[in-house]
Image (cartoon, grey):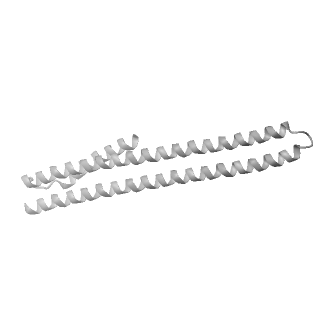
Amino acid sequence: MNKIIATLVAGVLASAAYAQTTTPASPATPAVTKAEAKADKANAKAVEKEMKADAKADEKTNKALAKAEKKDAEANATADKKKAKAQAKVAKADPDDKMTQQAKADKAAAKADEKAEKKVAKADAKAAKAKIDANTDKTIAADKTAAIKAKSDADIKAAEAKH
């Protein structure tokens, strides 16, 4: 939310700075005024679209990270249950059979840890991919906004040149 507010403030300040630096010394003609109004509208719309794209990308990233954390917790909990079950068998085993049961418990624990680590790695990789995709979406949105602003500036200059 803070990022959205910061973007809005930056857009307002940029618009104000743009208006101050592009105001011609002589009175603007109706064509220039029309071009500036059209540019302001296009720029505002582009900034709004970019903010929406950024928010959507952030939401996707947050969902992916939350899902990864959930899968991590589930995988570790499953591994812990398997280890506890194996240790319970060791505790119940006859003294003669304890060594065999401990070996089986150690093997089960290693297998459970391996499986959990694999699930965690896959979940983390999915979250990292989602983050990369979100950053790509943000970059594309920013590029579109910059292109629209550049076109608007060119349209204003063309209108001024006709003056």
Q: Position of residue 147 (x, y in %)?
A: 27, 59
Residue visible at 35% across and 48% down in the picture: 53
Q: Vertical placement of 93 versus 25: above or below?
A: above
Residue visible at 75% across and 48% down in the picture: 108
Residue visible at 86% across and 39% down in the picture: 93
Query: Which quarter of the rendering shows the C terminus?
Result: bottom left
Residue ranking furthest to the right: 96
Q: Position of residue 54 (x, y in %)?
A: 37, 48
Dividing the picture into quadrants, the one containing residue 79 is top right
Instruction: Using the image as rendered, state which of residue 106 and residue 162 is in the foreground.
Output: 106
Q: Position of residue 136 (x, y in %)?
A: 40, 56
Instruction: Using the image as rendered, state which of residue 9 and residue 24 is in the foreground.
Output: 9
Q: Is residue 125 left or right of residue 45?
A: right
Dividing the picture into quadrants, the one containing residue 24 is bottom left
Query: Which quarter of the rendering shows the N terminus?
Result: top left
Q: Is residue 39 left or right of residue 117?
A: left
Q: Position of residue 143 (x, y in %)?
A: 32, 58
Residue visible at 72% across and 51% down in the picture: 111
Q: Is residue 52 left or right of residue 29?
A: right
Figure label count: 0
